[in-house]
C-alpha cells in the first residue's frame, strides 16, 4: 500500500501539469530572489556614490561607512528614504580628530549622474571625542613664559578635568581643574566657569586660562566645512559626546557652488 502511494506520487510529479507547476514555483522564487538581490545592489551602488562625496562634504577620514534604505526603484532615481553615515577618525580643520561621527539623514535626493546632493528633509549628527585624541591635541601646549608638562584630559560622567604640572623653579607643581561642560552658542562649548573647581593654581592664573581656552577651542565646530548647530553635550567615562543638526540649506548651497567633477 505504501509503495503504491509513493509510486502514484512520483507518477503525478511526472505529469505535464505537475512539471508546469513545479517550474512555475522555481521561476517565482528566482524572480523574488533576483528582485531582492538587485534592490540591495542598487542601494549598494548609491552607498558607494554617497561615500565618494563625503571627503568634500565632511573632511577626510580613516574610514566612512554608508547605509541606504529605500525602495530600489526610488533609489535608481536618486530618492533615498534614509541614509546613515558613520566616519572613523574624521579630520577637523583645526587638526583635531573626531573618533566617531554618526549622521542620520531622511528623505535624501541625489543627482546620481552629477554626483551632487539636491535636497535633505532632515539630518542629525552625533560626534564622539576620546581622551587620547584630546590629550594629543593639547600635548606640549603652554602660554608664553610658562612650562607645563604631563597635561591630561579626563572625561567622567558629567564633567571634564584638565590636569598636569606647572614647572616652577625646576619643580613640577601639580594642578587640576574640573567642571561640567555647557553649550556656548551653536558651535562652541565651555567648561562652566561658575562650577569650575581648581586645585594647585589659581583660577585667574595664565596657565589655567590658556589650557581652558585651548580645550574649548578644540571643540569649536564653527570652522567645519558643513555648518552645524550643537544642541547637547555630555561626558561619559573616556568620551565627550556632542549631538546636533547640520545646516542643510547652507550645506547644499556650498556643495552646489563648489561642484563635483
Image: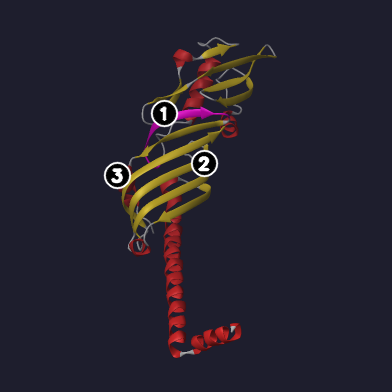
- Tell me if 206 is positioned left or right of 233 in this view: right
Q: Secondary structure at mark 1?
A: strand
In the rendering, at what x and y percent does residue 127 appear?
Answer: 47, 38
Going from N to C along the chain, the mark reached first, 1 or 3, is 1
Identify the residue position indicated by label 3 in the image.
249
Identify the residue position indicated by label 2 in the image.
100
How many C-alpha atoms fall within 10 Å of the one at disc 2: few (<14), some, or many (≥20)?
A: some
In the rendering, at what x and y percent does residue 77 appear?
Answer: 32, 63
Gap in angstroms between the C-alphas marked 3 and 2: 24 Å
Q: Between 134 and 24, which is closer to the camera in this rendering? A: 24
Specify the farthest residue to the right: 170
Going from N to C along the chain, the mark reached first, 2 or 1, is 2
Q: Quadrant of residue 248?
A: top left
Q: Between 171 and 112, which is closer to the camera in this rendering? A: 112
Q: Quadrant of residue 226?
A: top left
- Quadrant in which the C terminus appears: bottom left
Gap in angstroms between the C-alphas marked 1 and 3: 21 Å
In the rendering, at what x and y percent does residue 170 appear?
Answer: 70, 14
The kind of secondary structure the magenta stretch mainly shows is strand
Residue drawn where x is 55% and y is 84% of the image: 5
In the rendering, at what x and y percent does residue 33 appear?
Answer: 46, 70
How many C-alpha atoms fall within 10 Å of the one at disc 3: few (<14), some, or many (≥20)?
A: some
Mark 2 or mark 1, whichever is nearer to me: 2
Gap in angstroms between the C-alphas marked 2 and 1: 18 Å
Mark 3 or mark 2, whichever is nearer to me: 2
* Residue 174 highlighted magenta (yes or no): no
Q: Which residues are magenta?
A: 225-237
- Tell me if 142 is positioned left or right of 70 in this view: right
Specify the farthest residue to the front: 1
Identify the residue position indicated by label 1 in the image.
188
Q: Secondary structure at mark 2?
A: strand
Amino acid at each position: 500500500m505504501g509503495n503504491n502511494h509513493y509510486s502514484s506520487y512520483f507518477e503525478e510529479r511526472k505529469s505535464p501539469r505537475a512539471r508546469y507547476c513545479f517550474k512555475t514555483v522555481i521561476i517565482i522564487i528566482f524572480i523574488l530572489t533576483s528582485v531582492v538581490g538587485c534592490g540591495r545592489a542598487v542601494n549598494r551602488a548609491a552607498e558607494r556614490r554617497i561615500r565618494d562625496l563625503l571627503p568634500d562634504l565632511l573632511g577626510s577620514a580613516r574610514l566612512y561607512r554608508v547605509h541606504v534604505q529605500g525602495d530600489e526603484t526610488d533609489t535608481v532615481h536618486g530618492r533615498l528614504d534614509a541614509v546613515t553615515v558613520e566616519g572613523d577618525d574624521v579630520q577637523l580643520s583645526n587638526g583635531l580628530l573626531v573618533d566617531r561621527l554618526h549622521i542620520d539623514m531622511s528623505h535624501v535626493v541625489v543627482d546620481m549622474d552629477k554626483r551632487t546632493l539636491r535636497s535633505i528633509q532632515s539630518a542629525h549628527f552625533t560626534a564622539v571625542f576620546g581622551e587620547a585624541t584630546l590629550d594629543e591635541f593639547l600635548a606640549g601646549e603652554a602660554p608664553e613664559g610658562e612650562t607645563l608638562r604631563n597635561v591630561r584630559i579626563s572625561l567622567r560622567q558629567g564633567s571634564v578635568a584638565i590636569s598636569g604640572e606647572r614647572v616652577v623653579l625646576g619643580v613640577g607643581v601639580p594642578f587640576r581643574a574640573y567642571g561640567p561642560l555647557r553649550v556656548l552658542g551653536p558651535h562652541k562649548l565651555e567648561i562652566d566657569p561658575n562650577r569650575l573647581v581648581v586645585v594647585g593654581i589659581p583660577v585667574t592664573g595664565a596657565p589655567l586660562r590658556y589650557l581652558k581656552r585651548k580645550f574649548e577651542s578644540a571643540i569649536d565646530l564653527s570652522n567645519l566645512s558643513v555648518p552645524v548647530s550643537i544642541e547637547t553635550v555630555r561626558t561619559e567615562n573616556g568620551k565627550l559626546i556632542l549631538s546636533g543638526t547640520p545646516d542643510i540649506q547652507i550645506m547644499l548651497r556650498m556643495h552646489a557652488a563648489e561642484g563635483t567633477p
